[in-house]
Amino acid sequence: MKKQTKRMAAFIMAALMTASCFTGCGKKEDKNDKTTEAVTTEATASDAVDTSATDVFEDEIEAPEGYTLLWHDEFNGTELNQDDWNYEQHEVGWVNHELQEYIPSDEYAFVKDGELVIQPVKNVDEDGNVSYVSGRVNTQNKHDFKYGYVEARIKVPEGKGFLPAFWMMPQNESLYGQWPKCGEIDIMEVLGDTTNMLYGTLHFGAPHKQKQGTYTLESGDFASEYHVFAIEWEPGVIRWFVDGEQYFETSDWFTGTDGKEEQPYPAPFNQPFHVILNVAVGGDWPGDPSEDTVFDDRAAMKVDYVRIFQKDEYDENVEKPVDVLVFREADETGNFVYNSDFSEDESLTDDENWKFLLFADGAGEAEIKDNEIVITSTAAGTEEYSVQLVQPEMPMEEGSSYKFTFEAYAEEPRKMKAAVTAPDCDWIRYFPDTSVELTEDWQTFSFDFDMKDASDDNGRVEFNMGNQGSTATIHIRNVRLEKVQ
């Protein structure tokens, strides 16, 4: 969950698929459990755990090798323990243009059948006005910690407009400055209309930057079954896991004031953080609920347990990795866009450079045919980016000037938006989203722009073909991005 309004599109990254064995055992049968070394631990006085209302004792919980249990909640009591958790209260639109109001009530965040249930609710008044209420809880000033292995076993809600999250924020958000300078660790986010894909994200810096990994299930989804989501947070490195399998890692972050007065590494991730659990409704990323979105049990996020482990000691004497930009080379014509060999017809899924992406109810397919890319949409989706054609790794150098050109037509007149974006830098636009009117004849579109932001070796050429009033088939060819000065 983001702490500040922003428009977020999806960016698919290659996942790091390193096997690991960090999953703990729970009170329910868990098909995703991994074998780990059992460790008997004792909580400190300040982190004492009341086991009188739980069926799972500390000496029954398996810890990752080298770790001991710091704190846990199995939610086996009759109500949420407010010695451990805080209810939050926030108005509609507090962040990200979200639609829900967070109300501190056990009506929206409660313990039932050995689980924490966060239940969003849709209200319709006598005049037909719709409003949404949801729950959000945290452990701030009750269970804050610096470094550790953090996991929760969760089943997420299903439905357009839901954004469940298991994440972390600093105990003192003003230590390095307000978001994003303070840092944020998103352990799990899953869009309610794409419940087979997991996002793990790190937010930091001034200007705001992020590092993000994704994981897609080969079968099943995160809404119909429980999965264990975790991070391992050490000085200078954070790793993300699902069901004990590592899928992302980063050591590359910073913080400062508008890019100046940079704080010593590994700031801001060298201070105590706390855990947050919530379900957002609507907003910039998931979009609004649809007519098909239901607010019954399927809308609830269910948390089986939350567990925090720590090592006995950590070496904080770490050095920041050298941030070396690796710029893609242009082809012999000066074009940074790689069009591969378009002389051979193939599905676009086989192309190593162009990526065809579908989100937020978008549907369709793309193929290379007759030296062009043909995008056939069967559903426009709810967002302009619901149907996307993108190519990453565009070398954008501060102070340089660029020319962006392409040829396109549609089988019926329609609109399409083009842009050059920054997936790693809060999705800012190096070349702004620009609508073009496609006709049934080939047209050449050409745009000049200056790169005024900090240099970036991962800009992205982007064509957005969703939710713009038509699903007419689009043909694109001769895409070029070249530096002219």
Image (cartoon, helix red, strand yellow):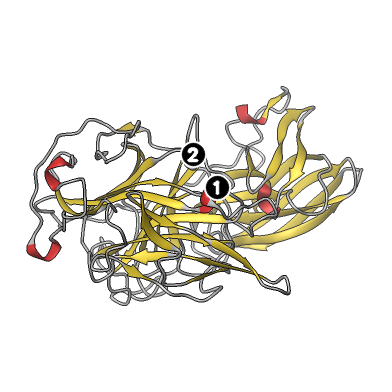
Residue on which the image places disc 2: 224
| Front residue of 241 and 435 | 241
- At a point 83% along the width and 49% down the height, the residue shown is 470
Taking 211 as reference, is 434 left or right? right
Q: How crowded is mark 2: few (under 14 residues within 10 Å), some or many (20 or more)?
A: some
Q: Is mark 1 on a helix, strand or loop?
A: loop
- At a point 67% along the width and 72% down the height, the residue shown is 125
Tell me the kind of residue under disc 1: Glu
Return the x and y of residue 219 as percentages of the image width and height: 50, 29
Return the x and y of residue 457 as percentages of the image width and height: 49, 50
Residue 21 visible (yes or no):
yes
Return the x and y of residue 183 as percentages of the image width and height: 35, 65
Q: What element carries label 2?
A: loop
Picture quarter containing residue 169?
bottom left
- At a point 50% along the width and 42% down the height, the residue shown is 197
Image quadrant where one finds the N terminus: bottom left
Return the x and y of residue 482 as percentages of the image width and height: 65, 49
Please report whichever mark, 2 or 1, sits nearer to the chain's N-terminal start.
1
Circle on res. 87: none
Picture quarter containing residue 339?
top right
Residue on which the image places disc 1: 158
Picture quarter containing residue 144?
bottom left
Tell me the kind of residue under disc 2: Ser
Marks 1 and 2: in contact by CB < 8 Å?
yes
| Front residue of 270 and 281 | 281
